Image: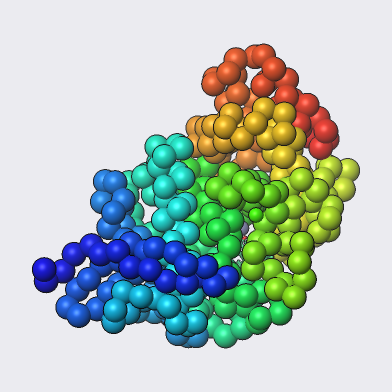
Amino acid sequence: VTHGATSGYGYGVLGDYKTLNTYYYNGWYYLYDVTKPMNGVIETRDANNGTTQGGYSVDSNNAFTSSGQAADVDAHKYAGIVYDYYYNTHNRNSFDNAGSTIISTVHYSTNYNNAFWNGNQMVYGDGDGTTFIALSGALDVVAHELTHAVTERTAGLIYQDQSGALNESMSDVFGYFVEPNDYLMGEDVYTPGISGDALRSISDPTAYGQPDHMNDYYYTSSDNGGVHTNSGIPNKAAYNTIVSIGKTKAEKIYYRALTVYLTSSSDFSDARAALLSSTADLYGYGTEYTAVENAWDAVGVY
Ligand SMILES: O=C(O)[C@H](CCc1ccccc1)CC1(C(=O)N[C@@H](Cc2c[nH]c3ccccc23)C(=O)O)CCCC1
Ligand SMILES: [Ca+2]
Ligand SMILES: [Zn+2]
């Protein structure tokens, strides 16, 4: 066979073994996944501590087992898991619902304690080893970043003030829906020397300095009007909703609100209305509807 889909394996950022959808071509194995429906492709690249998109992550024997490959392994595996979540749960084919290739670049810059969606692709730093380890090592972070792409292609929530905090919240909330084993964000890659902490918590935003009520909205000019702080308020409302109606119904109303009702300038009150409309569409005006009303009442958003 000259080229084609292959199955490889590797070790992730936390040293865990995982199988990989790779692609063989001309003597090299690529982190290039062509197994998704409707030709959705996932490709992973390596910036080699530079700040370019980098070249394809490749290996000579389809075993991505070196320490330098761990970030590549997780970025690739987790992007595939997030693709599968959106396709299987919401029938969405990639971030644009048109099967666009999902591109990740790892080893971005040096000691880079962050990750981002740059409008075209995901980019992950390695962390400095104290504040963070390689950020693609957390499935909820990967889901957070890819959800920015979904939001951009749907509601288009402007990344400023309340619409920006909603944008942030959607990424944290879908980060939970993809990785529902805790209500924390980023715990797997944050402060390796400290256990049990995280970047944020949707069950208790105040644990990490975020407000969980409109009375404590943080007015600031930094961070696009405090989008990573004020997201605590809609995050808490989402937690309240999840606890009362369950994940399966909650993720349906959130996806419908994001793709049908929310717009670029939606504020918190618009989000309440969007979620209530979505709930009514899907489940009527019964217990689920009341639960969503209560969830937002509790954070002071009407
Ligand atoms: O996607 C996002 O919202 C964040 C993107 C941040 C960014 C934006 C523009 C250019 C570069 C970086 C990245 C994440 C984030 O929430 N970052 C926060 C918290 C944070 C991470 N690393 C930091 C270093 C210093 C200060 C704050 C941070 C932020 O940038 O505020 C999301 C999940 C994990 C990292
Ligand atoms: Ca988590
Ligand atoms: Zn974000």
In this view, the residue in front, 127 or 2, is 2
Image height check: is 139 above or below 287? below
Residue 34: in sight, yes or no? yes
In the shown orientation, is residue 203 left or right of residue 255?
right
The picture places residue 27, in percent across and down from the top left corner, at 20, 80
Task: Name the residue at 61% across, 35% down.
Answer: 247
Quadrant of the image containing the N terminus: bottom left
Q: Nearer the viewer, residue 67 or 76?
A: 67
Q: Where residue 205 sits: x, y (%)?
A: 79, 51
Mark count: 0
Task: Single out the residue that lies furthest toward the left.
Answer: 1
Which quadrant is the C terminus positioned in? top right
Q: How is the image coloured?
A: rainbow
For ligand 1, give the image quadrant: bottom right
Residue found 60% across the figure and 23% down from its top: 279
Q: Is residue 36 above or below residue 46?
A: above
Q: List x then y, in percent, for residue 100.
A: 33, 54
Instruction: Say whether residue 23 is left or right of residue 242.
Output: left
Q: Is residue 270 visible?
A: no
Residue 202: x and y in percent read 73, 48
> Is 45 placed left or right of 214 in the picture?
left
Along the line of sight, which residue is nearer the eye, 86 or 299?
86
Q: Residue furthest right?
A: 215
The residue depicted at 87 percent of the width and 48 percent of the height is 216
Residue drawn at 77 percent across, 62 percent down = 196
